[in-house]
Amino acid sequence: MATRNIRVIGDEILTKKCKPVRFMTPRILQLIDDMFETMYGQNGAGLAAPQVGILKQIVVMDVDDGNQYVLINPEIIEEEGSQTGSEGCLSVPGKYGIVTRPEKVKVKALDTDMKEFVLEGEGLLARCICHEVAHLRGELYVDLVEGELRDNSELEEEEEGEEEQA
Ligand code: NI
């Protein structure tokens, strides 16, 4: 495993649409391992392949619920309710903003064996799924922020909390 460089806002690759994965290869498995290592190295909750410069529809997530999620070619098939809360992104370092997302989502995806499954997420997992799937469309959360994009240093002063970065 190896960590990869994270692309940051302003890099054109973050605005491009990703291509679906057609079949699994050792290189893609390596990429997924590297994405986890890169995400954990930065205390992230999720990472999408374009954030490490690869325009493929691959997402990894770990929202501290005891699971490591890999979503290949994900498609959100149901959304329910709404939640409004703070959100950050490893590609927008040092910032956070308030974003409204569905409270629950159902996402259809392939696993690393290219078998289809459906994942239901609520709360933080639902937020993370929406955030990461948007990366695959070339969209960043900063365009959804209500009010100002803020510095994490302000958050630490106010709440002394550690922000989830995806
Ligand atoms: Ni992100």
Image (cartoon, grey):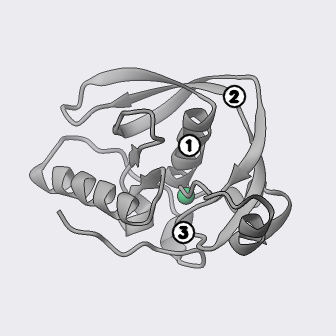
Question: Looking at the picture, does residue 126 appear above or below residue 17?
Answer: above
Locate residue 73, reporting x and y percent: 39, 39
Q: Which mark is residue 52?
A: none
Q: Label 1 amino acid?
A: Cys
State how many labels appear: 3
**Where ligand 1 lies, by image quadrant?**
bottom right
For ligand 1, tell me if the residue under mark 2 lies within 8 Å.
no
Q: Label 3 amino acid?
A: Ser
Going from the N terminus, do you reach mark 3 or mark 2 first?
3
- The residue wearing badge 1 is 128
How far is the residue under mark 3 from the one under mark 2?
Answer: 24 Å
Q: Is residue 134 left or right of residue 36?
A: right
Q: Which mark is residue 103?
A: 2
Q: How many residues crowd around disc 1 within 10 Å: few (fewer than 14), some, or many (20 or more)?
A: many
Locate residue 140, reporting x and y percent: 63, 59
> Which of these two is toward me, 153 or 26?
153
Point out the residue furthest to the left here. 26
How far is the residue under mark 1 from the one under mark 2?
Answer: 11 Å
